[in-house]
Amino acid sequence: MASVDLSASASLSASASVGVSVGLSASQGNPKLEVDTASLFAAFNFAVEITVQGIDGNVCNAAFSDCDGLELTHEVKTIREGGNNRAQIRLSGPASFGTITLKRGMTPNFHLWQWFDAVVADPSLRAQGEVVIFTRAWRESGREERARFLLERCVPVKLKAPPLNARDGMVAIEELQLACESIALKGVGAGA
């Protein structure tokens, strides 16, 4: 466990879900923040995999610097009961899912462009996507997978190339936006 000393004036906000605990140091009397770094995973350590039915292999197995829009919104309906002015009833409504935005990616091929063209030719074509989150630390066997966001029935909304230059041999993607019908979290490892 790594320990970090906190001054008495410092505020403490930590989540127990990532292995954080607070204790007093016997020698100093100051609170200590102990973090189990083996269970932490960084938000930026992720991969994106996209497969399309009828096409062998992954359409996308790329690295992106940013991933935004992994969000779920649940609409809540409010009903008032006649004669009861002090309370209201909340009913669950439909869920909606955000548009996934991937920025500054690199791929070794033009498969994402070809997939976009295929969707233009056949608007019913859908893909399955996964955003895989890894641990921050490298193990002997490589990165350890912590969780997956499963993206069901994706369709590309926007595919944007960056300014062109001759520095790299890779295919750069400035921005890829995906609309999907559902997003689910699939945990991996202990406690999932």
Image (spheres, rainbow, N blue to C red):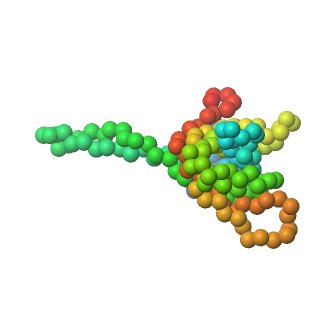
Q: Which quarter of the rendering shows the N terminus?
A: top right
62 or 22: which is nearer to us?
62
Residue positioned 44% across, 42% down in the render: 95
Residue positioned 67% across, 32% down in the render: 188
Residue 173, percent from left and from top: 72, 60
Residue 105, percent from left and from top: 73, 57
Q: Is residue 8 visible?
A: no
Answer left or right for 76 relative to 155.
left
Q: Is residue 146 above or below residue 31?
A: above
Identify the residue at the far front of this view.
121
Tell me the quarter of the picture where residue 38 sits.
top right
Residue 166, percent from left and from top: 85, 69
Residue positioned 52% across, 43% down in the render: 181
Q: Is residue 46 above or below residue 168?
A: above
Q: Which quarter of the rendering shows the C terminus?
A: top right
Q: Is residue 84 visible?
A: yes
Q: How many marks?
A: 0
Residue 91, percent from left and from top: 32, 38
Answer left or right for 183 relative to 46.
left
